[in-house]
Amino acid sequence: MTRFSPPAVGPALLLCLVLVLAAPRPGSPHAIVLESSPVHDAVLERAPGQVTLRFNSKIEKRFTRITLAAADQPPAAVALPESDDPARPDRIVVPLGPLAPGVYVLRYRVLAVDGHITEGALRFTVGPPR
Amino acid sequence: MTLLAGFLDVLLRGVGTVGLSAAVGGLVYVLLVLRPAPGAGGLVAAARARALALIAAGALAVAGATALLLLVVHPWALADEAGRWPLGQFLTTEFGLAALGRLALALLLLASVPWIRRAPAPGRWAVAAGLGVLLMANAAWLAHAVSRLHGRGPLMVGTVLHQLGAVVWVGGLIHLVAFALLWRRAGGPAIEPFGVRVLARFSAVAIGSLVLVLGPGIYLALSYVGGWGGLVGTGYGVMVLTKVALLICALVLGGLNFLILRRSGGDRGAGAVAARVPAFIEAEVGLGITLLLAAASLTSLPPSVDVVAARATPAEVAARFRPAMPRWSSPPVSELLAAAAPIDDTLAKRQPEEYAWSEYNHHAAGSFVFLMGLLALLDRAGWSRWARHWPLLFLGLAAFLFVRNDPRAWPLGPAGFWESMVLPDVLQHRLVVLLVAALGLFEWMVRSGRLTRPAGPLVFPLLCAAGGGLLLTHSHAMFNLKTEFLTEVSHAPVGLLGVLMAWGRWLEVRLPFADRRIPGWIWGACMTIIGLILLVYRET
């Protein structure tokens, strides 16, 4: 029977690979939306003037990024107002312009005060779905 | 980009916590455990030098992980549409300021090591200990608690005390492994009893640190989990349960150490202690590091008390573990590809064909693992020599996973082999296939006498520990919390059994020959149970 011993660096390299693959993975979003207006998958008769998101943790609002996409359209960035209610560190109010009937997906990226970055999406329909 | 940043965030937080353990736990170990003793001056000096090196390595890991998070990962993930990194702005956030503080403290602790080495005066050790205290206090502003809307202060204090207990315990164990290597090498009638006294002193420190882990830990669990519903119906709750199970396993090993020390009759039985205890400490370190990584992963999950609408009921969770006949047929790949939504559609609901495909994969993989577990037990019992070739079944499992893991890619799907390698999940799956094949090959070479290096038998437990840790800390949930939680809820017991299997096999390899029976049976049984869980796995 042929016996052989791999070079000593073999187990070390394998251990490095193990550590990389065993590393913890990103889990669910850390900051989750507890309440939103409109709610996810809402069907609205009229276009909402704004979207409100209430999170389960304090948010560093200046780093919030919002995009809105109509069905089959590329997402467009939505600017947030400079002034915001400091007494509501868990809420983000997104002003919306006039919206034509259709399905919209609002995507958000927020930074929680503890440094976790979260992405999420809210889908709603204005008028009868196209 | 956010997903990758989230992965790096949890990874770097985990590395930072392990580094903090080596650094701060090391300071406690040197000051309370490694005391000078007559006749052991040389060993104490060598052990202190090694402890200082480990403290420096720990401080460096904390500084490096923090710097990467603060200066690279977060600014990159927060870049605007034009790709500009908001570094200056980010440094003024509460997290940015706290992380800057941690970076400075870790660098100061790192710089204090050569300063202490030059003249190890008590005053210099006190300065290092002060830096350790500040590092622990600073952790309050980097944890979950800081972003809570209510009860932030007590939660921050509870977090720091809980972390302090974990860091002193795991850090002390890391340093004990380093000490045990020196101790066993030194040997001799004066040295062996000294080592026993060091271990006994650490037992007292470990009991104190476990009180710190458990007391504030129970308070944090009550605050973040809320009740039984949150414990079994959310990812956060299941991760807390997993941490408790890992802690119990580590406590069993710690208890065994304690009993061996007591039964050794003090200095006279030092030889028996030196032969057994280091292996148990190594396994405890493995469990402890898995615990720290699980804790880092826990910080990325929403607390159970916040997950109300997306919470699963205990009946829904129990239904996922109810035994049922395995699925022995799979939908054709063409049906799957026609039904499944594009991989980047994060709001799409999974289709029945996708569930059926995944369940079949789990059941087939389960039959491989179950068979290997049975053969490993047969081998352990010594009833048949051919059963020792059971690791070769890993090669069959690897081939099955390679073909079935990514139906959109070669050989089943339209994407070519090299074309699909740029997709992160495909790349990760193929690396896992390589690992599974390596696992089987290494263990088969060990068992068939083809691999004779001392490190060879340790490859299998290390890879198992990696696989178990991966499952414990891995979650796909991003948009459909409840559905994804129910899909992945069986990963927790499989991951836990994988970790137990790993350290059971580790003990079988590292303990004296007479003590190998029980860990040998334990890890074989764990592998068989993993196979059974996979065989009854269901996603609907």
Image (spheres, grey):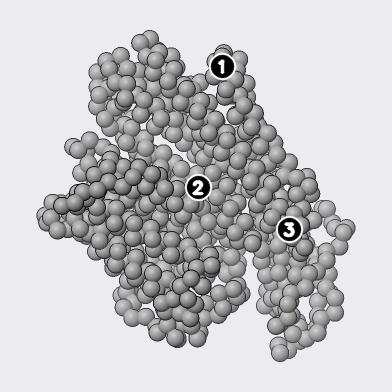
Give the percent coordinates (x, y) of residue B24: 55, 31
Residue depicted at x 22% and y 35%: B512
Q: Amino acid at mark 1?
A: Arg
Are the residues under marks 3 and 2 on the same chain?
yes
Q: Which mark is residue B79?
A: 3
Quick one: B435 or A58, which is closer to the camera? B435
- For mark 1, name the chain: B
- For mark 3, name the chain: B
Q: Mark yes or no: residue B420 visible.
A: yes
Q: Which sits earlier in the primary sequence, circle 1 or circle 2?
A: 1
Q: Mark yes or no: residue B486 visible.
A: no
Location of mark 2 (residue): B293
Residue depicted at x 32% and y 66%: B397
Q: CA distance from mark 1 to mark 3?
A: 45 Å
**Compared to A103, does B395 lie above or below?**
above
Location of mark 1 (residue): B118
Crowding at mark 1 (Cα within 10 Å: few <14, some 14-19, many 20+):
few
